Amino acid sequence: MVLNELERLYQDIFGAMDILESYVKHFKNHKKSLDTNSQTILDKIYRNGIQNNAINNEINNTRGKILNDTGQLIKNIDIIDLQMDLLMFKQDIEDVIDDSEIHLQQLKSRVMTYIDEFEELNRIFQQYLKNPVDGIKLEINQQMDKILTINDSLILEFNIISKYIKDSENKFEESEDEQVMELQLYNSSEKFADFTSGINDIKEMYEVFGEKLGISTSVHSLKIVKIESGSLFAKICGDKSVIGCISYFLKKITDLMFNKFTYEGKIYRAKQLLELLEDDLEYIEKCKELGLDTNFAEVENQKAHLMLVKSVQKIAAKNTKIRIDDETKSIDKQLEQKFLDSTQTLKLEEETS
């Protein structure tokens, strides 16, 4: 399992939970008030004992305040809005879990319980509106406690994972002329060659772009901040201009390969991809913006671009889902195996031709 992907799963879960954030804030503020009132009474009972008329009056007053505060909380919650938000949250969470490459039954179960507890609170709210008695207010407070307990446990788990990931990364200070890039290749492989080839392809791209931009890759070397196996995750750092070029090329060519296969059902050779790029005005303008020579008629320049296309093609050919920083490129699940078979066939054809 890639820890970074687990961290992203939690981030996606919290992103879906944003729709319920306003309710959770109401619950936390209400609980804080309840805890303060309860602690005040406990302190007075401890100092003066319970057989005291003043204490009994204080207890009754506090009980009345808690019930009034709970009644005010109920008024502040729009039951219809809560019901609609719960439906949206449930759908968003199902999408997050379905899309994730990580399937943790325990985490999924806890998130589903979180939804169940919210739905139960909504049911109790509706019950109170039909029959507004003090006993139901107690149920509401108990149900809110259950929701906050799960909410706090998810946050604690996320913070522990994030801290572990941060502590396990190579310690370095990123300078102003450096940039960090994350690359994740989701198709796992146990072969050492498959694991190292992706890193080698990135290294090759770094050197070619460095040469095209006139940047010494020995002075501005490529650094590995973090690397994980399973589905390859690499966090690398290098010259800002060079890393910017690699990031753009990975996104552009992977997108081109996946789209051409999705809509045309075929794999384009490296030269065919380069021809498409040479006619792509948006690509040409981006190359100029990145400081790259767009004179494709010049032989050496064309060779360099072809080498770059081949490097990306080798990475994309073995993967049906790739993440570059915050952008994820993927093939439709129904086409995944056909894509991998087609890229392998093309590779064999090129090797024997």
Image: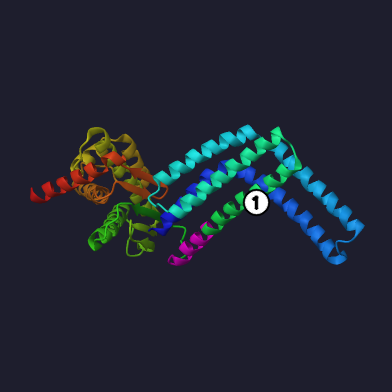
Where residue 135 appears, x then y in whole percent? 73, 44
Q: Label 1: state its secondary structure.
A: helix
Neighbour tally class for label 1: few under 14, some 14-19, many 20 plus, Cα within 10 Å: some
* Residue occupying image coordinates x 61% and y 34%: 81
**Residue sitting nearer the eye, 262 or 17:** 17
* Residue occupying image coordinates x 22% and y 42%: 338
Q: Is residue 315 magenta?
A: no
Q: In the displayed structure, does residue 223 sit left or right of residue 166?
A: left
Q: Quadrant of residue 278?
A: top left
Is 75 above or below relative to 17?
A: above
**Residue sitting nearer the eye, 221 or 312:** 312
Residue 62 seen in the figure? yes
Where residue 31 appears, x then y in whole percent? 70, 51
Residue type at mark 1: give it: Asp
* Residue occupying image coordinates x 45% and y 42%: 94
Q: Residue furthest right?
A: 53
Image quadrant occupied by the N terminus: bottom left
What secondary structure is the magenta-colored segment mainly? Answer: helix
Q: Is residue 168 magenta?
A: yes
Q: Which residues are magenta?
A: 158-171
**Residue sitting nearer the eye, 277 or 233:** 233
Where residue 112 appears, x then y in whole percent? 50, 46
Is 89 above or below relative to 45?
A: above
User: How many discs mark residues in the rendered view?
Assistant: 1
Where residue 320 appears, x then y in whole percent? 29, 46
* Residue occupying image coordinates x 43% and y 66%: 170
- According to the picture, the residue beneath numbered tag 1 turns out to be 145
Is 60 above or below relative to 164?
A: above
Residue 256 seen in the figure? no
**Residue sitting nearer the eye, 183 or 27:** 27
Q: In the displayed structure, does residue 140 sit left or right of residue 301?
A: right
